[in-house]
Structures are given as C-alpha cells and as structure tokens.
Image (tube, rainbow, N blue to C red):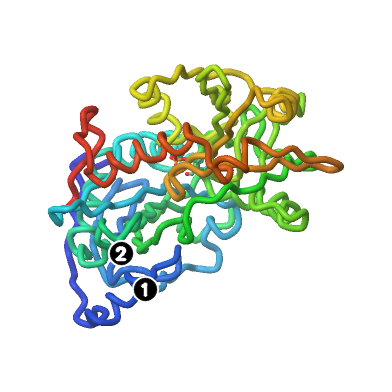
Amino acid sequence: MSSAALSFTVQVRSDVMPDDQREAVLANPGFGKTYTDHMVLATWTAGQGWHDGKVTAYGPLSLDPSAAVLHYAQEIFEGMKAYRHADGSVWTFRPKFNAARFVRSARRLALPELPETDFIESLRALVTTDQKWVPAGDAGESSLYLRPFMFASEAFLGVRPASVVTYCVIGSPAGAYFAGGLRPVSIWLSTDYTRAARGGTGEAKCGGNYAASLAAQVQAKDNGCDQVAFLDAVERRWVEELGGMNLFFVHGDGTIVTPELTGTILEGVTRASILELAGDLGLTVKEGRVSIDEWRDGAASGEITEVFACGTAAVVTPIGRLAWQGGEVVIGDHEVDGGVGAVTSSIRQALLDVQYGRVADSRGWMTRLA
Ligand SMILES: Cc1ncc(COP(=O)(O)O)c(C=O)c1O
C-alpha cells in the first residue's frame, strides 16, 4: 500500500460563479446553503491506498445504488472554518486536532486513516483555489465553513468494511451564527432518547450519530425549544452534550465545569480550547460528572450562574432555559444582561479574537491556508 503523501491536482473550472454573484452570496451567506466553485476528491482502495487526489469542479457525485454508505452508513466527517484576517490572509483553527479526530473516527468506523498532512493539505488546496469565497473578516463573524468527509463508496451489499472509499472536502460560506446579535437559546432535556452508549460511536464524528439525534431534536422543537440535551444511556442521570455542541456550567465561585470525556461524548476542539484558555481569564476549569439534578437545582438556586454550549459553528452559545416533560428552569439573570452572562461573553470573545487574528496567537493554534 502506498504511504507517499497525497498530492492534489488542481482542475480549475472555466465556469466559476461571476464576481458580482459571489459577492451577493457573501454579503448574506446564511449557513450551508451555497458552496464554493470547487471541491476536493481522493480515493482509497484496499490495494492502492490513497490516490487520485484532486481539486475539481463542485458538483453531484455519481454513486452506485449499492454503495455501502447508502445502506450501512459507513461515513465520518469533520467541521472547521477558514477565517480571513485583516491583512487578507486566510487561516484555520487547530487543524491538527480535527485531523487527529478524523483518524480516531475512521478507526471506529473501520474506514482507512487519512494522514494528518494529507488532511491539512486538502484544506489548503481547496481554500487556495477558492480563496475569493472566504468572506472578509471585518464583516463580523463570517467565515468559510469547511466540511471534510469520507464514505464507503464500494458497490457491494455485504456487511464488511468497504474496500473502496471516497474522501471529499466541500466549502460553504457562513455568516454570523447569531445574525441579530447573541441571544440565549432554550434546551429540551431528552428523556425518551439517548445519543450514545459506552462502546458505541458517541465519540466518533459519524453521520449515524446525527441521524439518531433527529427524533429528539423534533421533540425539542415540538416543545418550543431550540436544541436538545442528552443524558447518559445507563443511569439517565449524567449530562453529556447537545446534539451538536459540548456544554459548560459556570458556578458563582468562578469555576467552570464541563462533562468529562467518557467515550460517549464528542471531544470538541472548542471545548478543549476553552479548557486551555479559561485560566487566562481568571477562571478555574474542571472536567467532571454533572448530574441533571445539579443543573436543575443549581440554576434554580442561582449557584449556577451561566450555562453555555460550544462548537465550531456557533463558537459559544448562551443557554437561557432548560425545559423537560413537566417543568423548566431559567438560567442566569435576564433582567441584567439579557441572559448572556459575562463569563460566556468573555470566553466567546477570547476565542473569536484568536480565530480572526485580533490578538497574538500565543499557543500556535492558527495554521495559514492562503
Ligand atoms: C455532537 C457534537 N458535540 C460537540 C461538537 C463540538 O465540536 P467542535 O468544537 O470540534 O466543533 C460537535 C460539532 O462538531 C458535535 O457534533
């Protein structure tokens, strides 16, 4: 099997989106609606390893109806962003973290590992080719969302790891998650469903986890909530995470606590970064078990002063209300700060300042892409 680094041949299309149309998209990109002119593709076969890396025109993929991914969901993905700095350069945040998580996800889903250098080069190849699609950083919190993913493309209905696998990266311009200004979201506590069990795929970033969370997300909406929170699958007592974000609890004494990694939680790059940054802001951080009673009682008594969720898409999201079958509790002081606590705001700002190059990158978290 070849172990040489992949190279990405660039096939620039002649029919790229005209400048004025692209600028109109970038002025109001929303999320996940429009894609850049190109995408990255590479193929892995059991005999040849990774090969045929290329940047090519963005467009539909042709798949045999028997392709294994369509039947057995052998698929993994990543989510990250490219940020434009004030001098026009384009950077991404901690790509080695995502590359390593992609490798761990691949192992869990019996997919081939993509080496870290190939992963980062694939991002660089796409962003260099489509760099006009990275919104200006001064326009608030806009970025180019990058979605690397890998799936079993072999045409075969037997249940076994595929011997033909496709890797792809697509890019989609993204506006500020909270376009009308930061506002607290409401959370529905799922008691009917769990997201992951020990030994399952909870700590892998695979499509199946998200398919399994959708029924719970529908219940959240039906109950007037924005997002869903999951408890552990064994005792149904320990808080794990949201459908697509990790959780932090801010206590009155300046300690911030996040659920520890038990094998069922996705280890977020944002979570890991907050654990490192918090000390700079004078906060004490702790990874530990947080019970649902602690959340409910702490919010009701005021001992928990703020709760926030974190992830690449929304950075840091304040949580203003937790609801469940038969009850709810409001978190924080909405009279004073509109529900966005001071700790939540300062952590959010600290992360954004590094990502957009507004402060020195003292931890070497940023990697230049273009
Ligand atoms: C289930 C889940 N938890 C947490 C996160 C946050 O991870 P990150 O900070 O790496 O975006 C995500 C998003 O990727 C997710 O899908």
Image quarter of the N terminus: top left
Query: Camera-side residue: 216 or 284?
Result: 284
Q: Amino acid at mark 1?
A: Gly
> Going by the picture, which residue comes out furthest to the front?
336
User: At x 71% / y 40%, what residue is drawn?
Assistant: 322
The correct choice, above or below, for 341 with respect to 188 in the image is above
User: At x 72% / y 49%, what residue is drawn?
Assistant: 216
Q: Amino acid at mark 2?
A: Met
The correct choice, above or below, for 48 with respect to 21 in the image is above
Q: Which mark is residue 22?
A: none
Query: Camera-side residue: 278 or 5?
Result: 278
Please provide percent x and percent y for residue 306.
58, 32
Instruction: Count all numbered tags in the image, as a single digit.
Output: 2
Q: Which mark is residue 59?
A: 1
Q: Which secondary structure, mark 2?
A: strand
Is mark 1 in CB contact (under 8 Å) with mark 2?
yes
Q: Which residue is mark 2?
A: 39
Q: Is residue 234 visible?
A: no
Q: Residues within 10 Å of mark 1 (few under 14, many from 20)?
A: few
User: At x 20% / y 51%, what residue is drawn?
Assistant: 85
Q: Is residue 72 visible?
A: yes
